[in-house]
Amino acid sequence: MKNYERVRNLREDSDYTQKQTAEKLFLHLTQYRRYECGESEIPLNIAINIAKLYGVSLDYLAGLSDVKKVMNKSSLSDTETELIEKFRKLSRTAQGRLLERADVLLDKLN
């Protein structure tokens, strides 16, 4: 999927018109349309603003990831942050074991 298709899909999922989106991004409608249909490359500063508008990562916009949600420290609870920090300190083998145990716990919940 091209990044302009993702931009269009994000806009449509948010029920915005092209005009509304252009206004939110402080762009002329014609220029925004060019980005959305792939006629013009999206400059980094505009891509950053689009990512902020929809709460997605630049990796998602660029097609490098299918994960939309931006993960940063401020979006994580203290417990989640602690878990990630501890997980990163484990060996690959220990990380694998922990993930297996998490799967078992999740299966018990379902």
Image (tube, rainbow, N blue to C red):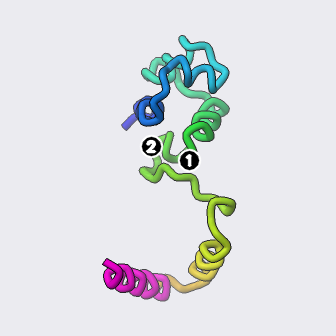
Q: Is residue 50 left or right of residue 14?
A: right
**Quarter-wise, where is residue 54 in the image?**
top right
Question: How far apart are labels 2 and 1 at the CA level?
Answer: 10 Å
Which residue corresponds to the image point at 58% horizontal and 34% vertical from the top-left?
50
Percent position of residue 102, x then y: 42, 82
Q: Is residue 70 magenta?
A: no
Magenta: main secondary structure: helix
Which secondary structure, mark 1? loop
Percent position of residue 98, x then y: 46, 85
Which residue corresponds to the image point at 63% horizontal and 30% vertical from the top-left?
46
Residue 57 is tagged as 1
Q: Is residue 103 magenta?
A: yes
Residue tagged 2? 63
Q: Which residues are magenta?
A: 93-110
Which residue corresponds to the image point at 64% horizontal and 69% vertical from the top-left?
77
Q: Of the two numbered discs 2 and 1 on the same chain, state the one appearing first in sequence.
A: 1
Tell me the crowding category of disc 1: few under 14, some 14 to 19, or many 20 or more residues within 10 angstroms, Cα based.
Answer: many
**Quarter-wise, where is residue 49 in the image?**
top right
